Image (cartoon, rainbow, N blue to C red):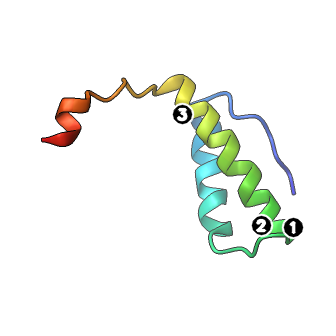
Amino acid sequence: MNIKSIRSEEDLAAALARMEQLWGAEIGTPEGNELDALSSLIEMYEAKHYPMPPADPIEIID
């Protein structure tokens, strides 16, 4: 497992490509642990660089 911080769009693309390779890995295996770590890093990067505006409750109902 070679986990690196995601600091750029290139890092994000590499992390997403690796995540795709690991997809379906069993929980508790080295591959599953790497997938879990990558998903957390990707989520943090995307939350910072692509924030979602709060949802309007009225729009959700309609």
Left or right for 57, reference 45: left
Q: Amino acid at mark 3?
A: Glu
What x and y, as percent, mark residue 62?
A: 12, 41
Assign a secondary structure to mark 3.
Answer: helix
Helix, strand, or loop for circle 1? helix
Identify the mark at residue 32; answer none if there is no mark: 2
Q: Residue at x 62, y 29 (%)?
A: 8
Of the pair 24 and 13, the residue shown nearer to us: 24
Question: Residue 43: percent from the left, percent from the top?
Answer: 60, 40
Report how many numbered discs are placed on residues in the image: 3
Give the position of the N terminus as an image quadrant.
Answer: bottom right
| Image location of residue 3, percent across then percent down | 82, 47
Say whether marks 3 and 1 touch (CB < 8 Å). Answer: no
Q: CA distance from mark 2 to mark 3?
A: 21 Å
User: Is 60 drawn above or below residue 18 in the view shown?
Assistant: above
Q: Residue at x 64, y 48 (%)?
A: 14
Q: Is residue 48 above or below residue 42?
A: above
**Distance of label 3 from label 1 (alpha carbons):** 24 Å
**Residue type at numbered disc 1:** Pro
Q: Which residue is mark 1?
A: 30
In which image quadrant can residue 32 be found? bottom right
Which residue is depicted at the point 54% across and 33% down?
Answer: 46
- Mark 2: secondary structure: helix
Q: Which residue is mark 3?
A: 46
How far across and down, in percent of the image, does residue 6 sit? 69, 34
Are the residues at dot 2 and dot 1 in contact (C-beta closer than 8 Å)?
yes
